[in-house]
Amino acid sequence: MQKLKNWIFNYQFILLIFALLAIAVSLQRYLPAHTFLGRFSYYNNFILFKSSLHHLIEAKDMYIAYENEGAWDLYKYSPTFAVLMFPYAFIPDLPGLILWNLTNVLLVYLAIKKLPYMNDRNKKIMLWFVLPELILCAQSVQSNAIIAALFVLTYTAFENKNVIAAAIFIGLATCIKPYAIIIAFIFLFYPYKFRFVIASLFTALALIALPLVLTSYSNLHQQYLSWFSMMSNDYSNSTGLSVMALVNDISRTPIDKNIVILIGTILTFSTAIFYKKYEDSNFRVLFVSLLMIWVVIFNHKSESPTFIIPVIGVALWFFSRKVTTLNFILLMLVLVFCQLSSSDIFPAFIRHEIFNKIHIKVIPCFLVWIVVLVKMWEEAISGRGGRVKLEA
């Protein structure tokens, strides 16, 4: 048992497991002889990502359907993200897919390992805790794990007073998913604000112009116009896997999702009124956790693979706090009903006919969001904190 414990709490062993699982998932998505819907691959998103670079170089509209290329969805990311796919776009699908999933998985590993204040034991347990959701995310071959890692790396950079790195991480995340810019809000709680603003402006300009190394100005201008047009028409009536869907389930009648989003946003950012409290590192980590949960569960486009972001937010909250009975129960609810509810541990009938219909994946994250929000108000008003004694 001691030998097993030594393995479990060994960074190198955890890194090996993360890498092997990324490779195994990539093979799983690549090897099936049949295709999705008769003609699309099981790694559709990766084909979509790497094809976008070729479309940019060939001056084709990146934001229309190219079903003949094996991708059934539309590309919805920035032209800059297409350029960032360069390392994956000119190699065969299988090694490219493996490299892509390794990038996602290992970036999460690095982000958690680099967390400030938290002791190594908690970091290692945190890595094991997020692994089930990370595997599910890798199976979808999306970019959500990168977003989650960049959120955490941004927080770490600010804590280390490295505002240039923070600006770069925020810029990269925003190039992938525009809503990721919300993490920039935390700069208000750190010094060197002017330096951060200047670094952000230079980073933004550099990233926006980056595609010019591969295409003309006129083509890039048209691509941005096409992207903005698509994004402006993308605000549908869907509620996704979100709190809005839960509210509709409970009320039995459709409720304007904008009202729910507005309430969630006001409550999340209401903690900013305790500006002086953010001098406490404990309060800052709570807000980052709150933000990572809120940005997904109040997003009308959320789907199962995006939940790696709130799951890491939940883990950040739990493993930086004193363990209480309530916190532990909530953590187990997130593990079982958020992470494992999407896996084959539960029979397909239960997943499709029960869990999906009641949006079970959202509920535990929503409960943690409420608890974190209440705890921040409570600690701000009382002046007490609940942080466990951690390493510097």
Image: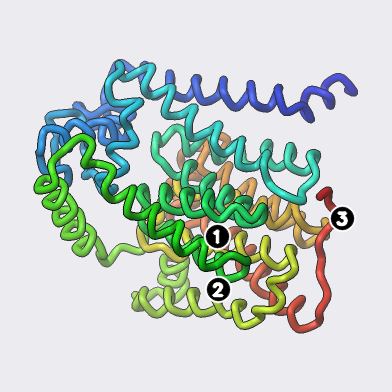
CA distance separating discs 3 and 1: 24 Å
Of tags 3 and 1, which is closer to the observer?
Answer: 3
Q: What residue do we see at 88% from left, 22% from top?
A: 1
Kindly identify which residue carries mark 3: 389
Residue 66 position by quadrant = top left
Badge 3: residue crowd in 10 Å (few <14, some 14–19, many ≥20): few
The answer to which of marks 3 and 1 sits earlier in the sequence is: 1
**Pointer 1 residue:** 293
Residue type, mark 2 in image = Thr
Query: Residue at 16% across / 28% down in the picture?
Result: 69
Q: Visible in this render: residue 81?
A: yes
Whether pointer 3 and pointer 1 mark residues with C-beta atoms closer than 8 Å, the reply is no
Q: Nearer the viewer, residue 247 or 58?
A: 58
Query: In the rendering, at what x and y percent does residue 356 appear?
Result: 44, 52
Task: Say which of 207 and 115 sits in front.
Answer: 207
The front one of 24 and 202 is 202
Q: Secondary structure at mark 3?
A: loop
Q: CA distance from mark 3 to mark 2?
A: 26 Å
Q: What amino acid does circle 1 point to?
A: Ile
Q: Which residue is mark 2?
A: 268
